[in-house]
Amino acid sequence: MPMTKKKINIFFTALKITNDIFVVALSFTLAYKMKFRWMLHLSDVEAYPDVYIDMYLKIFWLIVFIWIFSFIISGLYKEYGGPLKGMNELTAIGKGAIFATLLTLAFTYAYQGLPQSRYVIIYSLPVSFVILVISHWIINKLKKFVLRHNIGNKKAVIIGVSSMGQELVEKMFLYPDLGFNYAGNISNVTPDKLRYHLKDHYINLGIVKDYKKIIESTSAEALFIAVDDISQKLLNNIIIYCKDNDIFLRFTPTRYQFKTGSTDFDDMDGIPLIGVTYITFSKWRSFVKRIFDLLLAIPLIILTSPVMLVLALLVKFSSKGTILHKQKRVTLHGREFWFLKFRSMYVDAEDETGPTYSTSDQQDRTTKIGNFLRKTSLDELPQFFNVFLGEMSLVGPRPERPYFHDKFSKEIQNWDDRLLMRGGMTGWAQINGRAELTTEPLEKLAYDLYYIENWSLIFDLKIMLRTVTDVIQQKNVY
């Protein structure tokens, strides 16, 4: 009997729980040794030869129960996906470990018969956290390997090569844990442009009218329809075929439904209706986000000041021109401000071209120091001052230059909704594509609107942590 995605998930969840039981036991054993054998604490007592681990072994069942219960409550065993999968699991491990530690401490106060060394309980927290993070990372890598080799996932075919159809394929490549492996596209046209992750992987299986032969020849188990101009008759035939052959079928929403806001479903006396909920960002949420920015931006300015001073000297003495490059950008409610960066280009780099996007040809226009600053994203550090002054946020839609903002406002529906919050140093769009999305405003808008709708302080923290890892790995920077 073939392995399904559900069975794969159950297996790896059981593996994680089994792993966590052993990790908790190991952590408390190490914590015991740290306290009573290695003496990693402040005490006048040199050793505790009469304190044996047996008394702790007797209550391991209770400790393990408390910790596994805490992990369930924290959501550690949920199926996470997308670019923040690792951050979500890391957060769940942290929350679960802290809650379990507090709960265990509470038990020692409530029941005097339990071992009373709270050093052991406290030491177990960082030890277990480190081991859990490493072991879960290994298990997730193993699961990803299994899913990429068509074990448990459905082979998927996509009808259409629209922007949204390509995005579906891209997600399948990047996140196999979503449950699908890409088999190819069905389309009557050749795409003018392919998204970054499809350039070397795009497969054209044939034209739409041959969908039955294609699905049978590829043994596809899932079909996604990502095209608006399909005839109703053909669509009905596809639905009936998928139903008769037990093929998973999904449609992408139309461009209008997708770009104006979230959709909700309703009915009027049996007539199905699709509604649109418009995107807003309240003053209260804006205030909370602003306080959060200040609490982080001020210490970050202090901590990075020595680095910024060194970089300023390098920029100054490596080429002619100013240390800082100031550029007009558009932020909250359409307000323009001076966007700060360390100068990375030659002074006359845009004299002939005018405003341009940063693409892969930037090395010819940047100084040697400037190229290094861009690759490491250190040229962005002065934007902490933009955040401090209230012109930007640490996380948000990337602010555009007035030239491009005005252009896209006329061409793209709901482009101005990006201005419901301050522009960000990083954002949801940036960690989903970084420089590759620079020239894809429609895709960038989709990510920005999703971020605004789903904003939270935890979401911001996860994006910032993911940004740090992307910067270290120098992903898609020009």
Image (spheres, rainbow, N blue to C red):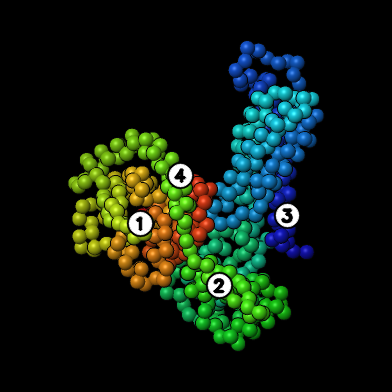
Percent position (x, y) of residue 225? 57, 75
| Residue type pointed to by label 4 | Phe
Q: Quadrant of the N terminus?
A: bottom right
Nearer the observer: mark 1 or 2; the answer is 2
Which comes before the other along the chain, label 4 or label 1?
Answer: 4
Which residue of the protein is positioned furthest toward the bottom in this rendering? 233
- Location of residue 316 by image quarter: top left
Q: Are marks 4 and 1 in contact (CB under 8 Å)?
A: no
Q: Amino acid at mark 3?
A: Ile
User: What residue is pinned by disc 3?
Assistant: 10
Asked whether residue 474 appears in the rendered view, the answer is no
Q: Residue at x 71, y 39 (%)?
A: 67
**Residue holding disc 1:** 331
Which amino acid, by three-letter code, is at mark 1?
Thr
In 3D space, how far apart are the residues under numbered discs 1 and 3 (Cα atoms)? 46 Å
429 vs 211, nearest the viewer: 429
Rendering coords of residue 195 (x, y %): 46, 66
The relative height of residue 45 versus residue 457 in the rendered view (above or below) is above
Q: Is residue 303 above or below residue 411?
A: above
Please name the residue shown 32% across and 39% down the image. 308
Q: Which mark is residue 292?
A: 4
Rendered image: mark on residue 286: none
Left or right: residue 160 compared with residue 45:
left
User: Label 2: which residue?
Assistant: 275
Q: Quadrant of residue 127?
A: top right
Q: Position of residue 77 (x, y in %)?
A: 68, 49
Residue at coordinates 55% horizontally, 48% vertically from top-left?
A: 87
Pointers 1 and 3 in contact (C-beta within 8 Å): no
Q: Answer with mark 1 or mark 2, whichever residue precedes in sequence.
A: 2
Residue 311: x %, y % from top left: 30, 40
Q: Real-space Cα distance between discs 4 and 1? A: 18 Å
Helix, strand or loop for disc 1: loop
